[in-house]
């Protein structure tokens, strides 16, 4: 019997769908000692007039750290209203190994909206779980798993 994908991937961090004001919002902090890889799915909805959307994976050695440093190579090309980037998605993947090479045990995503409020969200899926099933590390807000 094939293992369900929901047993292999955990919803480990989010920025919930909303109209997000200008500034930076962050996902939940992810402990990379629990997983081997994380994929951040950034979804832009309708961007505000002249808006920009940036996303980067930030790392730190402490769960309560400042998360000011971007994991090398883990930021997107800016999405813009002028570039007709409404309703587009971007995927950023980071491995525990890549983060550890920079001294980071913890990561989180940072979504930055510039110029005008815009609709967006981020869902981070963790794979290569060191302990399974994935539901053991799902966010508490995961309401139901149907497989």
Image (cartoon, helix red, strand yellow):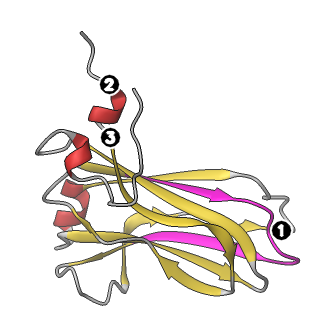
Q: Quick check: 144 above or below 24? A: above
- Nearer the observer, 83 or 147: 147
Boundaries of the magenta span: 39-57
Q: For residue 135, what is the image quadrant?
A: top left
Residue linked to disc 2: 4
Labels 3 and 2 touching (C-beta < 8 A): no
Of mark 2 and mark 1, the one earlier in the sequence is 2
Local packing at callout 3 (Cα closer than 10 Å; few below 14, some 14-19, many 20+) is many
| Left or right of 24 on screen, residue 94 | left
In 3D space, how far apart are the residues under numbered discs 3 and 2 (Cα atoms)? 9 Å
- Nearer the observer, 98 or 127: 127
Name the residue rendered at 63%, 56% in the picture: 43
- Residue 94: image location, x then y, percent: 34, 55
Residue linked to disc 1: 81
Q: In which quarter of the image is the N terminus?
A: top left
Give the number of the mark in front: 1 or 3. Answer: 3
- Tag shown at residue 9: 3
């Amino acid at each position: 019997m094939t293992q369900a994908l929901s047993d292999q991937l955990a919803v480990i961090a989010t920025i919930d769908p909303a109209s997000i004001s200008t500034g930076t919002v962050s996902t939940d902090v992810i402990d990379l000692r629990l997983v081997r890889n994380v994929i951040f799915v950034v979804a832009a909805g309708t961007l505000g007039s002249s808006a920009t959307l940036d996303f980067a994976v930030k790392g730190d050695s402490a769960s309560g750290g400042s998360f000011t440093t971007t994991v090398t190579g883990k930021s997107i090309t800016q999405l813009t209203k002028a570039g007709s980037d409404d309703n587009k998605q971007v995927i950023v993947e980071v491995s525990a190994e890549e983060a550890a090479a920079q001294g980071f045990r913890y990561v989180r995503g940072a979504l930055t909206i510039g110029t005008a409020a815009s609709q967006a969200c981020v869902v981070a899926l963790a794979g290569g779980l060191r302990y399974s099933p994935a539901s053991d590390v799902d966010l508490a807000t995961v309401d139901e798993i149907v497989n």
